[in-house]
Amino acid sequence: MGKEGFVADPATMEMRKRAKELGIRTVWHRYKENHARSKDAPFQATCTTCQQGPCVDVRRTGVCGMSRDVIIAKNLVSETTIGAAAHVGHARRVTAIMKGVGEGSIKGYSVKDTERLNEVYDGLGLDGAKSDNEKLVEIAETIQDDISKLNGAPKMLQFRSLEERKKLWEEKGILIDGGCTEIMEAMNRIAMGMDHDMENLLLGACRLGLVDAYCGMHPATLIQDILLGVPAITKVKTNITVLNADRINIVLHGHKPFLSDAVITAVEEYNSDPKNEPKINLVGMCCTGMEVLMRKGINFAGDILQQELVIATGAVELAVVEIQCTQPAIVDAAAHFHTKIVTTDPMAKMEGTTYIEFMPERAEEIGRQLVKMAVENRANRDQSKVYIPDYEPSEMLAGFSTRQLVACLDKAKPGDPLGALVDNIKNGNIRGVAAVIGCVTPRDDYGYRTVTLIKELIKNDVLVLLTGCVATIASYWDLLKPDPTYPGVGRNLAAVMNAIAKANGVEAVPPCIFMGACVDNSRLEEVLNATASYLGVRIDQLPVAGSAPEYIAEKAVPIGFWTVALGVFTHIGDQPNVAASERAVKWLTEDVEKIFGGKFYVEADPYKSAEKIIEVIEEKRRALGI
Ligand code: NFS
């Protein structure tokens, strides 16, 4: 029992206890030990840029005279740059794979979805290719150019954003050049003696939001869709309890699902041979886990906070990681057992692990090598140390890419799928749409903010779309499980969901719609753009909101600036480290709305945030006259 009667996930709580008994420190322990932020001592402005400093907890100005407001804005730009660089790094890696596939140097992947390929090829304004492979190369070169060019807006931005937004961004001076150029200039502007204008710095952060979206998330999603398939509806099981004490367990961890694809193939090969016993149980973690669950139906073992707990079961032979959100603490947890951790990316090595560089040209061979490693490591397992809590895994109905969503709606209103959504928004059955996205935090009871917020929204007939770690946590509370009684869902929303389910010949749809990993926030823009265009209004007029109730990663920060620049009311559950600047807080939570129509709203309490989101949705409805 926790906050206001909230009961945290029992499997996680039991594993936390177990980890403590074993002397494994988890993220919750470390949070208590290290966290400096408190109500009485809000994070102050601290500048570590130059050797006159560091200027710690600056009350007025730093040694150079830089104001507290500017220091805070500069630090926020720095965090946003790191976040954007992470997503561009992801896109760069998958773009190189796409090019190699098109040129024939990478054989392990091929076009899995021609429709998506053509949509992207045409959308980027390309033409004349004679084969799918030529299209892959041309698309890859276009994205590489978007990422690297010095001048001119990325073609992906031209393709994926609405005319009205592009015009506005140009007018307000935030239309971006190439991704690397923007990242370089962002670092340049925060160097000593450069940008000392708070508003200019914060507009710079908005630019990085666009970099993240159009040189990071959009290309990553599209390439993964083309080469690994567009997600379609699938059922999976989730939570730590998908580990199997009798099998060889392999965990796929990271964000870039190409290595995972090779491991999946190698596991299928191994498991199909009747001589091979015990079989392998392959499970996913963090965003790679989400990518493989929605495309391959692989069960999901844990979000960012659960990574040590999964290892602490003592049942994992091998955890393969590639990029992002890997907590180095898993090495410590693994040292208690036979568990091997393999890192695979030259920019994401980890002391105490085995490094096997993922070379996509050798994907098949590396997949097999990893499987062999896991199988051999099974003999080192001490079965008496295995401890998997005895709870049923949760059920998740996943795979709602935009295409799949449209296909479901099309059954409800043939020929006019968006009409099926918009009619119900207009008649008030659906009050509005909230995208709840991002990470989970150790700050309060596990899942408290996310689960409470989602429950409040769906109770009030707000349709909730999910991406990222919040989505998998939602599944532990059955918020992604189809149940024909629609428990906790508002009467009108439940009636709409029921009608959609019936039209599709299924018993029920889940109370919330899971749209994928964090890079798949790009899919949310597809939905936003299509809805705004259908209604003939701007995005900022739509009865929609975004929320990252438990964000922790730097990647979430540019995503937030992007949604604000798109015109979306964007809730975040924690104040970024800006509280010490009233001016910066005011700009982010008020002034920016006059520029882009979207703004940040900060509130930790999930009841208050739900209330505010609903209030904003109702205001937008009134303004639209619906
Ligand atoms: Ni998103 Fe994926 Fe999770 Fe947060 Fe990390 S896994 S990219 S950043 S923690 S949702």
Image (spheres, rainbow, N blue to C red):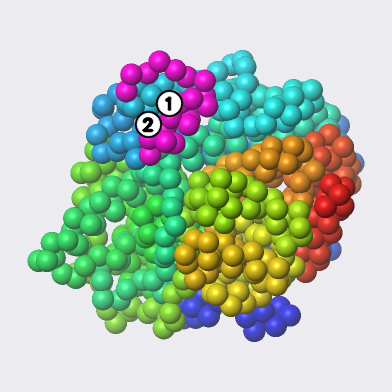
Q: Is residue 344 left or right of residue 567?
A: left
The reply to whether dot 2 and dot 1 touch (C-beta < 8 Å) is yes
Q: Quadrant of residue 540?
A: top right
Mark linked to residue 579: none
Q: Position of residue 535 (x, y in %)?
A: 73, 41
Image quarter of the N terminus = bottom right
Nearer-the-camera pick, 428 or 20: 428
Q: Residue at x 72, y 65 (%)?
A: 461
On whether ligand 1 comes within 8 Å of the CB at mark 1, the answer is: no
Q: Residue at x 46, y 71 (%)?
A: 395
Residue under pointer 1:
140
Which amino acid, by three-letter code, is at mark 1? Ala
For the question of whether residue 605 can be seen, the reply is no
Q: CA distance from mark 2 to mark 1?
A: 6 Å
Which amino acid, by three-letter code, is at mark 2? Met
Above-or-below relation of 430 to 228 = below
Q: Position of residue 4 (x, y in %)?
A: 73, 80
For the question of whether residue 200 can be seen, the reply is yes
How crowded pointer 1 is (Cα within 10 Å; few <14, some 14-19, many 20+) is rated as: many
Q: Is residue 274 left or right of residue 90?
A: left
Q: Secondary structure at mark 1?
A: helix
Q: Residue at x 83, y 52 (%)?
A: 626
Residue 502: say if magenta. Answer: no
First-in-chain label (2 vs 1): 2
Q: Position of residue 302 (x, y in %)?
A: 47, 64
Q: Which residues are magenta?
A: 113-131
Q: Position of residue 98 (x, y in %)?
A: 37, 31
Residue 130: say if magenta. Answer: yes
In the displayed image of the protein, which residue is found farthest to the front? 414
Residue under pointer 2:
98
Q: Secondary structure at mark 2?
A: helix
